[in-house]
Amino acid sequence: MSKSKARVARALEEAGIATEIADVGKARTAQEAADSVGCEIDQIAKSIIFRGEASGEAILFLTAGGNRVDGAKASELAGEELGKADAALIRAQTGFAIGGVAPVGHLNPIRAFLDPRLLEFETIWAAAGTPTHVFPMKSAELAQLTGAQVSDFTS
């Protein structure tokens, strides 16, 4: 098991969330991930990371698979202009590679915001630390587990 996937499994276990991590092969898009596990696209929790232009920190936006982050709304919520987070920042802050960023198990604390669309489903699916692994969880547990602020930041 990869270190990243093991870190996610440990974080879920420590939080008391019983789930199984599934191997979906290559799932480069939310639609491909949804098709692999047999759910709606909006049940896929995408981890979108921006870089705070003033703070230099990574900021996580957990959004429903069919939604897009609105840059202006996201910047307003973050309280600073947001820019593209590069692979090095994402790896340093979260410990994950782009395409496999999980909502939990980060190496360092990260400020997070949650798309309310995800809460409309009983179960959501999220990356499990690699680009080929996902896990299901109750959507109600996501905000609590991640400390994410439920906010409207999509277009």
Image: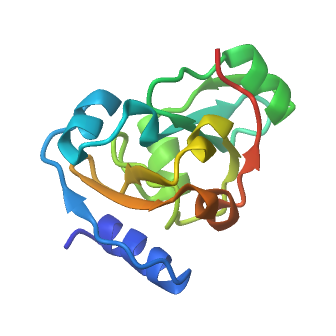
The answer to whether 121 is drawn above or below residue 65 in the figure is: below
The answer to whether 139 is drawn above or below residue 61 in the figure is: below
Q: Residue at x 78, y 39 (%)?
A: 55
Is residue 44 found left or right of 23 in the rendered image? right
Q: Quadrant of the C terminus?
A: top right
Q: Quadrant of the N terminus?
A: bottom left
Q: Residue at x 63, y 59 (%)?
A: 140
Q: In this rendered view, identify the residue nearer to me: 6 or 24.
A: 24
Q: Tell me the quarter of the picture where residue 147 sits.
A: bottom right
The answer to whether 72 is drawn above or below residue 100 in the figure is: above
Where in the figure is residue 38, as x and y percent of width and height? 24, 43
Q: Residue at x 69, y 65 (%)?
A: 144
Count of number-bearing discs: 0
Where in the figure is residue 98, as x and y percent of width and height? 37, 40
The structure's colour scheme is rainbow
Where in the figure is residue 40, as x and y percent of width and height? 36, 35
**Which residue sits furthest left?**
25
Q: In this rendered view, identify the residue nearer to me: 101 or 66.
A: 66
Specify whether residue 81 is in view.
Answer: no
Specify whether residue 44 is in view.
Answer: yes
Is residue 151 found left or right of 143 in the rendered image? right
Q: Tell me the quarter of the picture where residue 3 sits.
A: bottom left
Q: Residue at x 34, y 65 (%)?
A: 4
Where in the figure is residue 116, as x and y percent of width and height? 68, 38
Is residue 5 found left or right of 68 in the rendered image? left
